[in-house]
Image: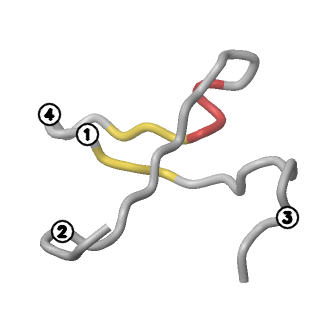
Amino acid sequence: MSPERGAPAPEFKLEAAGGKRYSLSDFRGKWVVLFFYPKDGTKG
């Protein structure tokens, strides 16, 4: 199920290449750009 357009992004956590973990809430109050792309090696 996709979020509605204009709705806040759901909370999530990611691990950076150096092993540091980031969560979306770490950037609260700052501009953040989220970019999603199709699976590597696919058209699009």
Helix or strand or loop: what does disc 3 sit on?
loop
Amino acid type shown at disc 3 = Glu
Report the residue that reaches farthest toward the front.
43
Amino acid type shown at disc 4 = Gly
Q: Are marks 3 and 2 in contact (CB under 8 Å)?
A: no
Q: Mark on residue 40?
A: 2
Q: Mark on residue 18?
A: 4
Give the residue number, with chain letter if any, for mark 1: 16
Q: Residues within 10 Å of mark 4 (few under 14, many from 20)?
A: few
Between the C-alphas of marks 2 and 1, the distance is 18 Å
Q: Residue at x 45, y 56 (%)?
A: 36
Between the C-alphas of marks 2 and 4, the distance is 21 Å
Between the C-alphas of marks 4 and 1, the distance is 5 Å
Give the residue number, with chain letter if any, for mark 3: 4
Front-lying residue, 15 or 42: 42
Q: Are marks 4 and 1 in contact (CB under 8 Å)?
A: yes
The quadrant of the rendering that contains the N terminus is bottom right
The quadrant of the rendering that contains the C terminus is bottom left
Amino acid type shown at disc 2 = Asp
Left or right: residue 41 compared with residue 26: left
In which image quadrant can residue 5 be found? bottom right
Between the C-alphas of marks 3 and 2, the distance is 26 Å
Amino acid type shown at disc 1 = Ala
Q: Mark on residue 32?
A: none
